[in-house]
Amino acid sequence: MSHVHIIGGGLAGLSAAVELAAQAKVTIYEAGPACGGRARSFHDKTLDALIDNGNHLILSANGLTFRYLDILGARHTLSGPGIPIFPYYDLQDDLAWTLRLSKGKIPFWALPGGRRVPGMKLSELSSLGRFLKANDNTVVEDCLKPGQFSRRLLEPFAISVLNTDLHTGSALLLGNVIRKSLAQGGMACCPWFPEIGLSETLVDPALAYLRRYHGEIRTGVRVSAIEREKGRVTAIESTEGRIELGPEDHVIVAVPGPVAQSLLPEIIAPDAFESIANAHFKLSTPVKARGVVAQARFVGLVGGISEWIFLKGDVLSVTVSAANRYADRDSNEMLATIWSEIRRALDPVLPHPLPVAMPPARLLREKRATFAATPEQNRRRPTAKTDTANLALAGDWTNTGLPSTIEGAIQSGLAAVSALGFRSAIKHTES
Ligand SMILES: Cc1cc2nc3c(=O)[nH]c(=O)nc-3n(C[C@H](O)[C@H](O)[C@H](O)COP(=O)(O)OP(=O)(O)OC[C@H]3O[C@@H](n4cnc5c(N)ncnc54)[C@H](O)[C@@H]3O)c2cc1C
């Protein structure tokens, strides 16, 4: 039986391992103390609460993510309203509204009435067409028609999806996401997020599944070198010693791009990154909202620094994307600003106002949360297939056609499996 050695236990590595479990012996080498990489939850001692390293929103359009969860029997661990509704609050104009997308492809939601973005004109929908036609040099701001549809929906959507500013973000990558989501109708845009935490939804069920197939998961093992001879990997060097490979063995390198480059100097990978900041606030009692916010359990924000507030029992978590622009801002000052934005957006839908004094809080900044999704960086993404016969690449930074996302990471794992000649849900098609 073939033995596939997977270096990196993030979602790309886990996706590959799950796909291979019934076809080969699988071993994952993960440098950290636990698998999950950039999508993990942990118990935070300061807040004494389980928190995600960063809030992750998954759209129903993410078909490969849902397939992965179905294989693991873990779809039920996601939570969401089940319909395409997005409550928003505009901090600049003090205005709350709810975007209610039509379920089908025809955008009835954009017609005048209570379902669309306030102040938008129907003609602004043409921005979507521009994204669908974008080429590899187009940036997001080139496609945006000025107006409230852009300001209140497309701009924040672009920044969340690409984690890159509008002046440099790739319109092609955003267009690929729009093609799979908004262009397919509202039911492709239902928002989901883990009910308990990222690890409980995306990681722990995968590890349990792999153990059922006798897969080996070796955490705390950092791979430091990959030895090759005559176009094949022959050994892996790790903190636990040297691992010799047999003639039937394969390797999937599923580590972040810069680590992959240090192991395989010939590959080209993205070399510019964007950060994401997440603020977590621990309340003394669970926060119970009314109406549509209770249904969605999140609110999108426009016109401030906060982008999404997630209501998770007694924890309120806020996402700030493309956060390189806030790198010099003091963390306590940022937390105070975010707390005031939360109060403005949530107080109107709560039975009692939130405390004026900021509760215990943490600001987590993931400096290299994603590669900068610019046209230039997008051109630096390699395919899964390499010139080394028994070696493939995986990771959200490989050439998936998607920005750095859970769906992209899962797709990349499947592409690596396919590139090595194993059965996979996707054929090896990238060029
Ligand atoms: C704060 C934040 C918010 C995000 N929000 C969203 C969102 O809302 N929606 C969405 O779809 N995506 C989101 N993302 C992106 C998503 O988390 C990533 O695209 C995805 O998790 C990447 O998975 P990966 O396996 O490619 O990489 P990683 O998760 O980086 O996995 C790589 C693994 O390799 C391990 N490793 C590194 N070096 C070695 C070595 N030498 N030997 C062995 N192991 C090694 C690492 O420890 C890590 O576990 C967000 C990311 C962040 C950081």
Image (cartoon, helix red, strand yellow):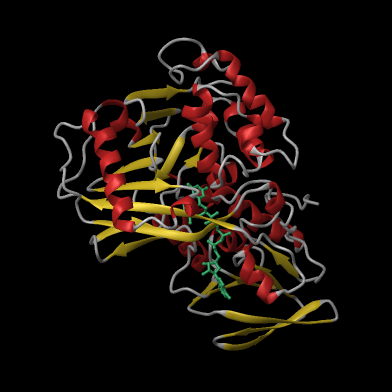
Q: Quadrant of residue 204?
A: bottom left
Determine whether 259 is above or below 73 in the image: below
Q: Quadrant of the N terminus?
A: bottom right
Q: Nearer the viewer, residue 308 or 312?
A: 308
- Res 201 seen here: no
Q: Nearer the viewer, residue 211 or 157?
A: 157
Q: Quadrant of residue 260?
A: bottom right
Q: Position of residue 112 (x, y in %)?
A: 47, 10
Q: Is residue 218 found left or right of 336 in the rendered image?
A: right
Q: Position of residue 291 (x, y in %)?
A: 27, 26
- Res 339 seen here: yes
Residue drawn at 61 percent across, 72 percent down: 7
Determine whether 80 is above or below 426 in the image: above
Residue furthest to the top in view is: 112
Q: Position of residue 38 (x, y in %)?
A: 49, 60
Residue drawn at 53 percent across, 63 percent down: 10
Residue furthest to the front in view is: 328
